[in-house]
Image (cartoon, rainbow, N blue to C red):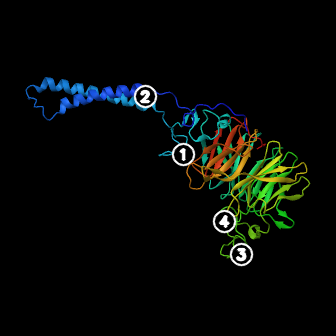
Amino acid sequence: MLPNCASMERGDGSGVSAPSKIGVGVYQQKENEEMAKTVEQELFDPGEQEQRDQSAGVGRRRFLAGVGAGAVMLGARAALAQDKPMAPPSTVTTPPRDFGPNGAPNTYFWDADVLAVDPSFNGLAQPNAPIQRLWTGALWAEGPAWSSVGKFLLWSDIPNSRQMRWIEDDGHVSVFRTPTNNSNGNMFDFQGRQLSCEHLTRRVVRYELDGSITVLADSFKGKRLNSPNDVVPHADGSIWFTDPPYGAQLYEGTPDPAGGKSNKAGKLNNRVGQPVGVSDTRQELPTQVYRWDPSGRLDVVIPDDKVPNPNGLCFSPDFKKLYVSSTGPAGKGDIHVLDVGSDNKLSNQKVFTDCKVDGVHCGPDGFRADVFGNLWCASNAGRNVGYSGVTVWSPEGKLLGRIRLPEICGNVTFGGPKRNRLFMVASQSLYAVYTATQGASPG
């Protein structure tokens, strides 16, 4: 976590408000109201019997006096209204904020949807930097990864079995690769090669620099993997990945053959719309976390009974800790942290956070660490508007801040030429915001 910084004034109400001139305004308002009341009594007193032949001069003067007093009152009230800081539109306002390119300006020094829970977050969030929706059009966006050499972001659109690319130079978005076998998590290793988790084919692949594809893992002890989900490289050349069952559904992969765990009644046809033979495998293994060694050996590093339904994972900047989220109906809905030994053995497992914010469960998914060791986590708060987006936690598990998005966030990564821009894939869209920190991982 960044050392505590002095709390900065924030225009969204989370800091110290500017001094007001309300005392002067109230005095002027009372004086104007008394004047208007006097004029109103003179103009509209029912007891007054003003003669028609005298009303042309006197009535006109009284009318003008009343109009003048009313104008003064309106001016005073407008001044009072301006003394109160205007609240910019946000995810939780009515009407809600428009994140599109034609939406109204929303940043008044601090973005209205970037919230500091702890004062130290002011040293991580970037003033004058708005949250921007860069693109929309996916069915379920996941797996963002930044290519430092190519200066582009790629991510998965799982149901559409494609990978999308956003280019830094001009913001152009196009299809990067299709079909992708319903790929989910992506990452670039320390040599700049893309790693990808595929649901449909139940494997982890690496795209080599010469354009060929290497299958790193598709089975363990003769049994097919479930549906690899998220993947991270280690500095020693190994690859670590999670293997929950989420690809065993029609929307993000293919169900098991009749009688399998995801198709026990056998009503679903697992072969419809799929290449021959691809969908005939079924879930055979528990949900686990694996380590692929450069020698080709595959080891279980976290068994199912320790972290059921493992999903997102990342290392601390010094690779001495591994963070893993446990999600889904069979998961725990929290994030665990484990010590990584010199022999790559994990120990001292603890619950890092239960992901509760204001009593609301902000379900975790993918996440990334910054160079200070803080964890930037995707948040799925369901129908709790204003809690989906990103939660930011210190290395000790303390909530530092939040980023509110109008869609459920599935994953995040740091990118940009300085690696100080947080990219967030949320349901159908891609969002980004600049920060005052940098991502720790290569991509």
Give the Cα separation between the discs numbered 4 and 3. Answer: 14 Å
The residue mark sitting in front, 2 or 4, is: 2
Q: Earlier in the sequence, mark 2 or mark 3?
A: 2
Identify which residue, 397 or 95, lies in the foreground: 397
Q: Residue 400 in the image: state x and y as whole percent.
A: 66, 42
Secondary structure under tag 1 reads loop
Please state which amino acid type lies under the numbered disc 3: Ala
Q: Earlier in the sequence, mark 2 or mark 4?
A: 2
Helix, strand or loop at disc 3?
loop
Which comes before the other along the chain, label 1 or label 2? 2
Check residue 22 in the rendering and tell me which mark sits there, or answer none: 2
3 or 1: mark nearer the eye: 1
Residue at mark 4: 250
| Left or right, residue 384 beside residue 61 | right
Q: Which mark is residue 91?
A: 1
Image coords of residue 282 (percent x, y)? 76, 69
Q: Earlier in the sequence, mark 3 or mark 1?
A: 1
Q: Is residue 140 visible?
A: yes
> Quadrant of residue 169 in the image?
top right
Q: Label 3 belongs to which residue?
A: 258
Total of numbered circles in the picture? 4
Which callout, 1 or 2, points to the residue nearer the camera?
2
